[in-house]
Image (cartoon, rainbow, N blue to C red):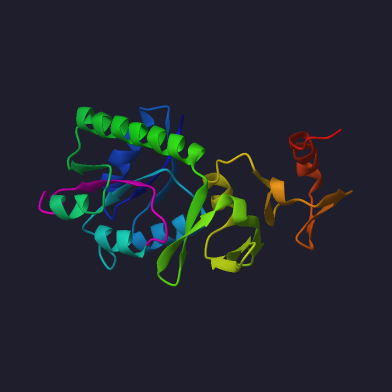
C-alpha cells in the first residue's frame, strides 16, 4: 500500500526536510508540495491525497484554518515548532502531531500510525453501503443502492439518485478514487455509473433511468467484463 502525500509549510527548509524524510520510505509518494495553505486547498479540491504533513503557523491561512475550510480531509499529521496547539489539533482527530525539528524515529512512528489508520479506513469503505456528501453546510447520507450515476459538469459533479440530484464541488477523479464498491464503474471521462442500474447497452452508450450515457472505447471492455452476460 502506498500513501500519496502532500507537504504544506511556509518554510523552505521545513519542506525540504520533510521531503527528505519521505524519500526514505518507498510507500510514501509525495505528489505535491505547497508553501501556503491556499494553494493546498486548491490542489486538494481537484486531486485526492491520502496524507498531509501540515504546518500550523502559516500566514493568511493557518493549519487550523485549513482544516475548517477544506471540503474533505485525508489524514493529517501536524508539523510545528510549538506544542501549545496540541490539544486544539487533536480535537480535529488528526493522525499525529510532530514537533520540529523532526527526528526520524518519531517521523517513522507517525508514518506507521498513518498506515494503520489507512488500512482500517480501507476495510471500512470496502464494507460500507453508503456515502456522505456535503449539501448546504451539512453531510447527508446517500445509500449506494439509490445512486444512479455521477456526472462531471464543469467545476462540479452531479450525483443523480432515484429521488434527487445533488451538486458537489469535487472532481470525478477524486470521487472515483474514493469509491471502493464494485458496483460502480467509470465508463467515460464524465460518468461513473451504478452497474446495477443499467437498463440496456447499445454499442457505445448505455441507459440509466432514461439517461443516455456514453461509453468510452477504453472502458468498454472493462464494462462488459463486469456484466453477467449469457
Span colored in magenta: 70-85
Give 68 or 21, whichever is nearer the viewer: 68
Locate residue 226, reporting x and y percent. Answer: 74, 36
**Residue 164: quarter of image:** bottom right
Task: Classify the position of the C terminus by image quarter.
Answer: top right
Locate residue 67, reporting x and y percent. Answer: 31, 59
183 on left or right of 209: left
Is residue 190 depicted above or below 81 in this figure? Answer: below
Marker count (numbered): 0
201 on left or right of 87: right
Task: Check if residue 80 falls in the magenta segment.
Answer: yes
Q: Is residue 16 visible?
A: yes
Locate residue 124, reporting x and y percent. Answer: 44, 38
205 on left or right of 44: right
Task: Check if residue 79 falls in the magenta segment.
Answer: yes
Give 185 or 70, whichever is nearer the viewer: 185
Please tell me whether the stretch drawn in magenta is mainly helix, strand or loop. Answer: loop
- Which residue is found at the position 31% from the left and 29% from the top? 112
Give 134 or 163, whichever is nearer the viewer: 163
- Which residue is found at the position 21% from the left and 53% from the top? 91
Amino acid at each position: 500500500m502506498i500513501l500519496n502525500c502532500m507537504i504544506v509549510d511556509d518554510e523552505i527548509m521545513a519542506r525540504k526536510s520533510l521531503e527528505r524524510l519521505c524519500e526514505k520510505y518507498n510507500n510514501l509518494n509525495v505528489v505535491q508540495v505547497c508553501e501556503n495553505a491556499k494553494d493546498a486547498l486548491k490542489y486538494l479540491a481537484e486531486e485526492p491525497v491520502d496524507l498531509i504533513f501540515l504546518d500550523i503557523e502559516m500566514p493568511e491561512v493557518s493549519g487550523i484554518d485549513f482544516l475548517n475550510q477544506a471540503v474533505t480531509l485525508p489524514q493529517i499529521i501536524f508539523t510545528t515548532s510549538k506544542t501549545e496547539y496540541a490539544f486544539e489539533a487533536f480535537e480535529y482527530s488528526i493522525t499525529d502531531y510532530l514537533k520540529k525539528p523532526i527526528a526520524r524515529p518519531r517521523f517513522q512512528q507517525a508514518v506507521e500510525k498513518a498506515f494503520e489508520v489507512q488500512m482500517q479506513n480501507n476495510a471500512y469503505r470496502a464494507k460500507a453501503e453508503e456515502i456522505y456528501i456535503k449539501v448546504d453546510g451539512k453531510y447527508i447520507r446517500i445509500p449506494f443502492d439509490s445512486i444512479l450515476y455521477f456526472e462531471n459538469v464543469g467545476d462540479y459533479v452531479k450525483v443523480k439518485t432515484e429521488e434527487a440530484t445533488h451538486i458537489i464541488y469535487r472532481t470525478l477523479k477524486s470521487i472515483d478514487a474514493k469509491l471502493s464498491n464494485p458496483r460502480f464503474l467509470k465508463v467515460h471521462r464524465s460518468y461513473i455509473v451504478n452497474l446495477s442500474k443499467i437498463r440496456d447497452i447499445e454499442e457505445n452508450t448505455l441507459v440509466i433511468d432514461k439517461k443516455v450515457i456514453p461509453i468510452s472505447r477504453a472502458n468498454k471492455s472493462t464494462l462488459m467484463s463486469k456484466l453477467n452476460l449469457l
